[in-house]
């Protein structure tokens, strides 16, 4: 009795439906049984297959049936906090869930998780950035586990043509936490007899990683910066010469964007505009604020100036680089032709956006007042891989030269000037207020209804809080807090209920004078 | 069906001197055959679906040899009614379903059979769908056992013991002329294990050896005066007989321990967890050797009075570990001890939570509280306190490091699910002022996920197939429209009679949408009367839903292919705005994507291997034009439609992105069309094994197009060093 281990090796597997967590559990159980270790596994598959989180729990008693003799083990059915030797999850947030449930402890738990993210509906459906902080998960895992093995098994599996759970199985084998010889793990895969080749391949990858024999491909950078067109060089030189280092990425990116969007003259306009902000930023001690004012204004000014009209969309969709990106994204082999169909549905907004002002404005005024026209739009299915389809977009994109004469252009420039003026006005009173107003421009995004809704919210918040605060009609300090609340609320739900609530909850603005 | 059971069937054939290895629910199935059942019926539902699936799919041959009749019943009531065969004849039968929901449906038949009593062993295998992973309301089956006076077996989770108890339960049923319910929790159904098999027993009477004569016996009819007599029988004969049998056959178990001034009484199903809990507190070893004596109630109803009094008599304090609410056992225990004038302190729901599953942490903390309160002789309390504190501390630390609670991962519609588009259409329809916000009476099935994000649609869920019936009271009291949802599963389970014929008879004037995906999908794609199985099923065996609807007098019936969101939205509007009176039914039709993929993927793979031309379709999102407002996701919620960090240095919000798991169902295109979303979506058809023609056209097109495309200064993928930090600190003024 005393010779026998005092507890089984406990292992919990957290996966998402359809990720083969069950298969991996079976492999582990079989490998252990081949070594004659008493083993038990159970699971909560529940509605797993329907994309929910699912757990498998395995207990392996590290003494053979022979050693135990006729004694019968009583094994657990639930993973228990502070009682896990191995925790495996197929995704980073599921690892976080295990941490949250206390399954990972520094005295005994080896945490094995793929570091990629599969975002939950709640995270995905936020109108802004609703993602859970990956760095928090990563850091917590490192701190709480005896050993944390975290790397992107998903992309590795995709690249190598194998599956995540096979790689994880290899990692388990390589971790040495189970008293099972390598070959037995392989045998378990062979015995299971499903996709043996690719599973073994994955297994070897995981094993190699644990032995330090595997070079992981460097993670692709999150941000892609644009090559500059030759005719943007002089402007970029100006930025390099006159702008603080912290702001150069954004501002020069803005210039590249606008040269590409329209022409160097338009980019110069951008620079002139942002110069006026930088000037104020310098007066107002921008260096102590990491030049946030110039940064955020520069960011959103560039985005507002490169508003998405059909010329822009046609331009972006008819580029060579775009077609290449699509091919890569859908994993088309070099010799495989692809047919690409675009789903365009222009309405009066889009059509008038490319009309001259004298024609566009009256039509829009009429359309806005007309129930039918407001909802009117026609579906266009354009096949951009065909010459005909491509040319339709391409010729649209050629209208760029004419953009400055369009109705939408006038509208946008007026809006931009108004917004800029408010930002500058605010900056002269309260730095952070100006930054908030700059960031408010993030509401002006999306297409059709989403865009309209965004504009309404933007205008309302500007009129009721942004502008009055910038002129100190309302207390700027109060405005900072109010604006950040309202901006968050505007992005909380499309129905605008949250925004209504936020407005109603705003405590009355103290009628103070300027913050100075 | 979701999976095949070829391997398991081979296990079911094993006999003397061999072993069974596998899941608990299949061990139970094998045990039934070893006990010589003549018939098995049931209704699918986790966690007992496999029992039916294995018997009614791959093991048809074996069943024929043994002469065992198996059938997938229309619903649980039908399944329970099957037990009528054991009322007059000495034949054993077993039925199964998900409980308590299934038992609710079955209870009419259950009461009548319980009252009439049985001659042959009648076993009801309950999947006690309680706690984590459950998909139903949280109740106990125990109450049914009490009110019908049928026996409830809750076996200790250990394959050999379970198999033994199945056989015992049949005997118990026969000796006490009472049906026996045997409950298995989710984890018990899925737990793996092994036991020495016995030869399957050919039933005395079966399809192969028919019963010679029908038996008429008024005593077995649920009608006065018999019913009065039957009630007396329960009390005077069946109850005592049961208690004697349970005691004499040691169905409950006593485990001794050295600190015997206290003790633990637990439901059999919780025994393993009790041991593991004690082990964590340093009070038990891996072989179940506990410091405290344990009385393990494998039969939780009826309680055997002299067993409990005997166990408690010499103890200062006992802890009863009983999962769920109300605390029937604790009450019974207190009453029994009081009657026997045994003054042992009974601790139970005062150290354990009154409701909810007793998972490991709950179990450990509950036991710790009991021990710390009872202070058993010779037990050092320090390690006990330390163990519980360690867990709490570690969780607190985790919470602090994570900074925020981990977002839930609710189940949702699968990639390419044909039911999702219907809710997209409903969402859009409600944006139409003529339609407006509606009250939606939802139903049970995959479509219940509409009540979760991102759809958040459905105001009530009242039971399987009750979607339409549950709208009867509210429909005329609502300013706006009231519509109902029902799956084809619920439709055939009882919705046709409970909902539709009633609505027609009462001249309801609202809309019902029947989700016809061709299977009882949520339970594992079992077929239904209307299943065509993608054309695999002989047409003359299929009963189309519209025929059934016409049969009960529905006039307004429209069929709509679910993926056409625009059409669906218009049809919904038409149904709600038409002047035509009466019940309107839209049959939202398209095959369950899981079933479809399972059938078509291998075919495509084969064609691909053999060099045939195969077109793979999927969707994509242009990261350049996506502005990151995610309205597409809110209208879809497809697992394959996700987000990724925005590659644009100027933008912060994540962009939408289609994952490679996309099956190209077309919803994305339909939605961005019907909802006038944004131009970022594109559909890509990849021509695999392209023909010469394909290649030539492709080259030509690319060449010509290339002439127009200049160098567009594609984005470099080089990371930019001085990229700004995501969050910029701003010094307060």
Image (cartoon, coloured by chain):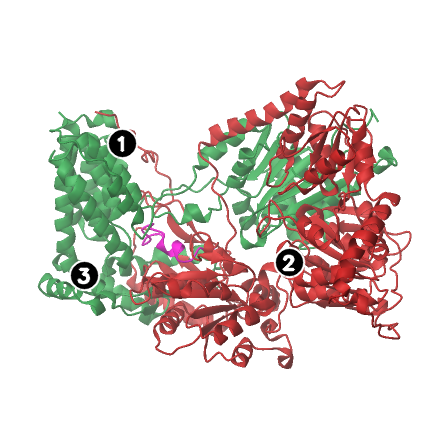
Quadrant position of the C terminus of chain A in the picture: top left
What residue is drawn where x is 35% and y is 44%?
A224
Q: Position of residue B581 (x, y in %)?
A: 39, 77
Counting other residues with Cα less than 10 Å from the Cα at mark 3, is it few (<14), some (14-19), or many (20 or more)?
many
Count residues near mark 2 (Cα–Cα under 10 Å), then give few for <14, some for 14-19, many for 20+: many
Which residue is disc 2 drawn over? B102
| Residue B206, image x, y percentages | 85, 69
Which residue is pictured at 70% across the width and 58% down the height?
B50
Q: According to the rendering, which colour does chain B have? A: red
The mark lying in front, picked from 2 and 3, is: 2
Q: Which chain is green?
A: A
Q: Chain of mark 3?
A: A
Q: Is residue B531 above or below residue B157?
A: below
Given residues A131 and B427, the one toward you in this image is B427
Side of A44 where B181 appears, left or right: right
- Chain bearing tag 2 is B
Mark 1 = which residue?
A246
Question: Do we see residue B666 in this rendering?
Answer: no
What residue is pinned by disc 3? A353
Q: Residue at x 56, y 65 (%)?
A: B490
**Marks 2 and 3 belong to one chain:** no
Q: Quadrant of residue A277?
A: top left
Q: Which quadrant is home to the N terminus of chain A? A: top right
Q: Is residue B409 visible?
A: yes
Residue occupying the point 39% across, 42% down: A222
Q: Do the residues under discs 1 and 3 have CB atoms within 8 angstroms? A: no
Q: Is residue B338 found left or right of B658 in the rendered image? A: right
Instruction: Count the numbered circles shown.
Output: 3
C-alpha separation, residue under disc 1 versus residue under disc 2: 65 Å
């Amino acid at each position: 009795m005393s010779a026998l281990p005092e507890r089984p090796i406990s292992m919990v597997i957290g996966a998402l439906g359809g990720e083969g967590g069950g298969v991996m559990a079976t492999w582990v159980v079989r490998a252990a049984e081949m070594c004659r270790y008493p083993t038990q596994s159970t699971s909560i598959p529940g509605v797993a297959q329907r994309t929910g989180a699912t757990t498998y729990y395995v207990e392996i008693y590290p003494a053979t049936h022979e050693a135990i003799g006729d004694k019968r083990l009583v094994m657990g059915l639930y993973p228990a906090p502070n009682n896990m030797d191995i925790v495996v999850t197929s995704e980073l947030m599921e690892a976080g869930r295990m941490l949250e449930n206390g399954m990972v402890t520094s005295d005994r738990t080896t945490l094995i998780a793929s570091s990629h993210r599969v975002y939950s509906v709640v995270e995905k459906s936020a109108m802004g950035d609703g993602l859970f902080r990956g760095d928090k998960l990563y850091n917590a895992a490192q701190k709480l586990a005896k050993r944390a093995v975290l790397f992107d098994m998903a992309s590795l599996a995709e690249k190598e043509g194998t599956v995540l759970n096979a790689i994880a199985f290899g990692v388990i084998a390589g971790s040495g936490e189970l008293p099972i010889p390598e070959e037995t793990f392989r045998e378990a895969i062979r015995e299971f007899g499903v996709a043996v080749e690719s599973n073994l391949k994955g297994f070897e990858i995981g094993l190699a990683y644990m032995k330090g024999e595997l070079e992981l491909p460097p993670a692709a950078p999150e941000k892609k910066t644009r090559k500059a067109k030759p005719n943007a060089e002089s402007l970029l030189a100006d930025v390099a010469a006159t702008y603080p280092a912290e702001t150069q990425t954004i501002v020069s990116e803005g210039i590249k964007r606008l040269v590409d969007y329209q022409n160097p003259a338009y980019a110069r306009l951008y620079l002139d505009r942002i110069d006026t902000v930088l000037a104020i930023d310098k007066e107002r001690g921008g260096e102590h604020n990491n030049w946030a004012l110039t940064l955020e204004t520069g960011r959103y000014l560039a985005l507002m100036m490169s508003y998405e009209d059909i010329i822009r969309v046609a331009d972006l969709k008819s580029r060579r680089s775009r077609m290449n990106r699509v091919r890569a994204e859908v994993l088309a082999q070099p010799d495989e032709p692809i047919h690409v169909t675009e789903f365009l549905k222009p309405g009066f907004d889009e059509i008038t956006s490319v009309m001259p002002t004298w024609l566009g404005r009256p039509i829009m005024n009429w359309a806005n007042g007309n129930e039918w026209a407001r909802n009117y739009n026609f579906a266009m299915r354009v096949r951009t891989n065909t010459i005909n389809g491509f040319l339709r977009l391409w010729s649209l994109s050629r209208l760029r030269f004419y953009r400055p004469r369009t109705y939408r252009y006038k509208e946008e420039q007026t809006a931009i000037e108004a917004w800029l003026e408010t930002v500058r006005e605010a900056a002269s009173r309260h730095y952070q207020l100006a930054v908030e107003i700059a960031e408010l421009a993030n509401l002006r995004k999306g297409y059709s209804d989403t865009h309209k809704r965004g504009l309404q919210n933007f205008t309302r918040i500007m009129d009721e809080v942004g502008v009055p605060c910038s002129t100190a009609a309302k207390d700027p300090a109060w405005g900072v807090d109010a604006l950040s609340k309202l901006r968050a609320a505007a992005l909380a739900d499309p129905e605008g209920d949250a925004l209504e609530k936020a407005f109603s909850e705003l405590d009355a603005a103290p009628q103070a004078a300027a913050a100075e | 069906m979701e999976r095949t059971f070829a391997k398991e069937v081979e296990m079911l054939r094993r006999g003397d001197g061999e072993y069974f290895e596998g899941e608990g629910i299949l061990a139970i199935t094998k045990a039934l055959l070893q006990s010589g059942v003549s018939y098995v019926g049931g209704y699918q539902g986790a966690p007992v679906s496999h029992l039916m699936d294995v018997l009614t799919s791959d093991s048809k041959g074996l069943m024929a040899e043994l002469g065992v009749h198996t059938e997938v019943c229309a619903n649980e009531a039908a399944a329970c009614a099957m037990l009528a065969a054991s009322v007059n004849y000495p034949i054993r039968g077993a039925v199964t379903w998900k409980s308590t929901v299934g038992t609710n449906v079955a209870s009419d038949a259950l009461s009548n059979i319980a009252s009439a009593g049985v001659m042959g062993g009648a076993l009801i295998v309950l999947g006690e769908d309680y706690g984590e992973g459950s998909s139903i309301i949280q109740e106990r089956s125990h109450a049914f056992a009490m009110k019908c006076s049928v026996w409830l077996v809750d076996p200790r989770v250990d394959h050999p013991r379970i198999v033994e108890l199945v056989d015992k339960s049949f005997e118990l049923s026969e000796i006490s002329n009472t049906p026996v319910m045997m409950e298995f929790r989710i984890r018990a159904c899925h737990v793996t294990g092994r036991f020495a098999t016995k030869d399957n027993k050919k039933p005395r009477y079966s399809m192969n050896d028919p019963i010679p004569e029908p038996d008429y016996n008024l005593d077995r009819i649920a009608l006065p005066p018999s019913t009065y007599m039957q009630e007396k029988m329960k009390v005077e004969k069946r109850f005592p007989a049961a208690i004697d049998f349970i005691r004499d056959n040691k169905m409950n178990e006593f485990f001794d321990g050295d600190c015997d001034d206290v003790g633990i009484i637990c439901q059999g199903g919780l025994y393993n967890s009790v041991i593991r809990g004690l082990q964590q507190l340093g009070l038990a070893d891996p072989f179940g050797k506990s410091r405290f004596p344990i009385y393990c109630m494998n039969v939780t109803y009826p309680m055997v009075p002299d067993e409990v009094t005997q166990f408690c008599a010499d103890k200062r304090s006992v802890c009863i570990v009983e999962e769920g609410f109300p605390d029937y056992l604790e009450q019974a225990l207190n009453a029994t001890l009081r009657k026997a004038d045994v003054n042992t302190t009974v601790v139970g729901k005062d150290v354990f939570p009154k409701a909810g599953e007793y998972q490991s942490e709950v179990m450990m903390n509950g036991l710790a509280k009991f021990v710390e309160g009872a202070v058993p002789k010779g037990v050092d309390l320090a390690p006990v306190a330390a163990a519980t504190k360690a867990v709490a501390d570690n969780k607190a630390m985790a919470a602090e490091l994570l900074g925020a609670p981990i977002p839930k991962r609710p189940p949702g519609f699968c990639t390419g699910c044909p039911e999702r588009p219907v809710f997209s259409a409903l969402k859009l329809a409600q944006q139409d002022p003529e339609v407006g916000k509606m009250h939606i009476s939802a139903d049970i099935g995959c479509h219940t996920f509409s009540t979760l994000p991102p759809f958040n649609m459905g105001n009530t869920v009242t039971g399987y197939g009750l979607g339409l019936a549950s709208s009867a009271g509210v429909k005329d009291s609502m300013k706006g429209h009231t519509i109902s949802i029902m799956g084809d599963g619920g439709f055939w389970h009882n919705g046709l009679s409970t909902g539709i014929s009633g609505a027609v008879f009462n001249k309801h004037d609202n809309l019902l949408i029947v989700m016809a995906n061709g299977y009882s999908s949520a339970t594992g794609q079992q077929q239904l009367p209307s299943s065509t199985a993608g054309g695999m099923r002989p047409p003359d065996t299929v009963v189309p839903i519209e025929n059934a609807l016409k049969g009960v007098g529905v006039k307004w019936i429209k069929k709509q292919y679910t993926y056409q969101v625009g059409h669906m939205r218009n049809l919904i509007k038409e149904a709600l705005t038409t002047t035509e009176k009466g019940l309107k039914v839209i049959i939202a039709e398209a095959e369950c994507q899981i079933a479809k993929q399972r059938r078509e993927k291998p075919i495509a793979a084969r064609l691909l291997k053999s060099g045939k031309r195969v077109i793979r379709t999927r969707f994509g999102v242009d990261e350049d034009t996506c502005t990151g407002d995610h309205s597409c996701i809110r209208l879809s919620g497809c697992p394959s439609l996700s987000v990724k960090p925005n590659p644009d240095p100027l933008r912060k919000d994540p962009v939408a992105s289609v994952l490679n798991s996309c099956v190209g169902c077309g919803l994305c295109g339909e939605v961005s069309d019907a909802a006038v979303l944004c131009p970022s979506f594109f559909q890509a058809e990849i021509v695999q094994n392209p023909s010469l023609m394909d290649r030539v056209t492709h080259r030509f097109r690319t060449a010509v197009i290339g002439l127009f495309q200049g160098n567009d200064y594609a984005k470099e993928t080089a990371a930019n060093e001085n990229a700004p930090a995501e969050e910029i600190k701003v010094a307060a003024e």
